[in-house]
Image (spheres, rainbow, N blue to C red):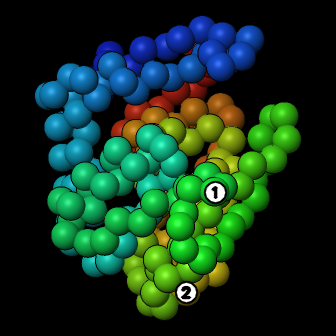
Amino acid sequence: MKLEKHIRTVPHFPKEGIMFKDITTLLKHKDAFRFAIKEFTERYRDSGITKVVGAESRGFIFGAVLAHELNCGFVPARKKGKLPAKSISEEYELEYGTDSLHMHEDAIEKGDKVLVVDDLIATGGTVKAVCDMVKKLGGTVVECSFLIELTFLKGREKLGNIPAFSLITYDSEE
């Protein structure tokens, strides 16, 4: 199945010059959504993953379903002020400043084999922040997985030696 045909590009969102890749058109298409989940599940079924970490917010969609399919735990990496218990945080850079993600300090246990999931990798700041938190808590990131990768932004380079996998790649802004 060509998943790309289920992605809508929205010009100038959230700001002028950005060509936003909207995944809601894929999510509403039951066969495309099911196909994407099946592809991820088959890739990781026998990998020994013990936790899936999803980055806020669209990483929750794929991460939670994938954790269910892999019979392992799901951990949300949230924006500031969203977690009720003691948490750790990691800042990352945006085009226009910084932001941070947070994870409960008891979410990952030493020795956990972790899959980090998000809907899209662009510059790599978000996923690197998540990986850094997993490492701080004693887990090992097995791989980072994305529905979409904007390869022209070279976000994968921020991951160093952590493997990454994407179902859809775009080599240019168009």
Q: Are marks 2 and 1 in contact (CB under 8 Å)?
A: no
Is disc 1 surrounded by few (<14), some (14 to 19) or many (20+) residues within 10 Å?
A: few
SS for callout 2: loop
Direction front: furthest residue: 84
At x 57% / y 33%, what residue is drawn? 150
At x 54% / y 63%, what residue is drawn? 83
Say what amino acid the circle numbered 2 marks.
Gly
Compared to 170, does 54 lie above or below? below
Residue 133 visible here = yes
Residue 154 visible here = no
- Mark found first going from the N terminus, 2 or 1: 1
Of residues 26 and 166, the one nearer the viewer is 26
Residue 81: assigned label:
1
Determine which quarter of the picture holds residue 138.
Answer: bottom right
SS for callout 1: loop
Of residues 174 and 84, the one nearer the viewer is 84
Is disc 2 surrounded by few (<14), some (14 to 19) or many (20+) residues within 10 Å?
A: some
The residue tagged 2 is 138
Q: Position of residue 37 (x, y in %)?
A: 23, 45
Quadrant the C terminus occupies: top right
Say what amino acid the circle numbered 1 marks.
Gly
Q: Position of residue 77 (x, y in %)?
A: 53, 59
Determine which quarter of the picture holds residue 90.
Answer: bottom right
Compared to 117, does 134 lie above or below? below
At x 51% / y 39%, what residue is drawn? 120
